[in-house]
Image (spheres, helix red, strand yellow):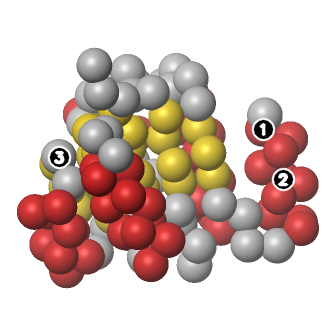
Amino acid sequence: MSKKFVVIGLGILGRNLATILVSRGAEVVAIDSNMELVEEIKDRVTFAVAMDSTNEKALKAQDIADVDAAVVCIGENFQDNLLTTVLLKKMGVQHVITRASNPIERQILSELG
């Protein structure tokens, strides 16, 4: 049985992570608000969708609460990164891994658990 991941944020880090996970046999749902990035990766992942990850209803519609892990790779907008992380935890995602770009962000995110 393969592992199922969601990767949110398809910049360089997110795209590379998503393709590595797929190459290792994982199912990967790739999410970004930028349709061009979604189009670029859609044929290399299990499912790709363009959406606002800070929209709780949109996240729930993707049925991602049962993934083995969610990785938030949003690097340019810490507020979106933080809100997405909080929503994933609220939805019951067991393992949420989030990108921190500096020590202050790391401290804030570690306070979330």
Considering only vertical position in the picture, is 65 above or below 59?
above
Q: Residue 46, labelled with which disc?
A: 3
Q: Earlier in the sequence, mark 3 or mark 1?
A: 3
Q: Residues within 10 Å of mark 1 (few under 14, many from 20)?
A: few
Q: Which of 43 and 101 is in front in this view?
A: 43
Considering only vertical position in the picture, is 48 above or below 70?
below
Residue 28 in picture, x, y percent from top left: 29, 45
Q: Residue at x 37, y 69 (%)?
A: 15
What amino acid is found at the position of numbered circle 1 in the picture? Leu
Q: Distance between the residues labelled 3 and 1?
A: 29 Å
What amino acid is found at the position of numbered circle 3 in the picture? Thr
Residue 27 in picture, x, y percent from top left: 26, 39
Q: Mark 1 points at which residue?
A: 112
Q: Is mark 2 on a helix, strand or loop?
A: helix
* Residue 113 visible in this rendered orientation of the protein: yes
Horizontal side of 31 relative to 69 (left or right) equals: left
Q: Nearer the viewer, residue 2 or 7?
A: 2
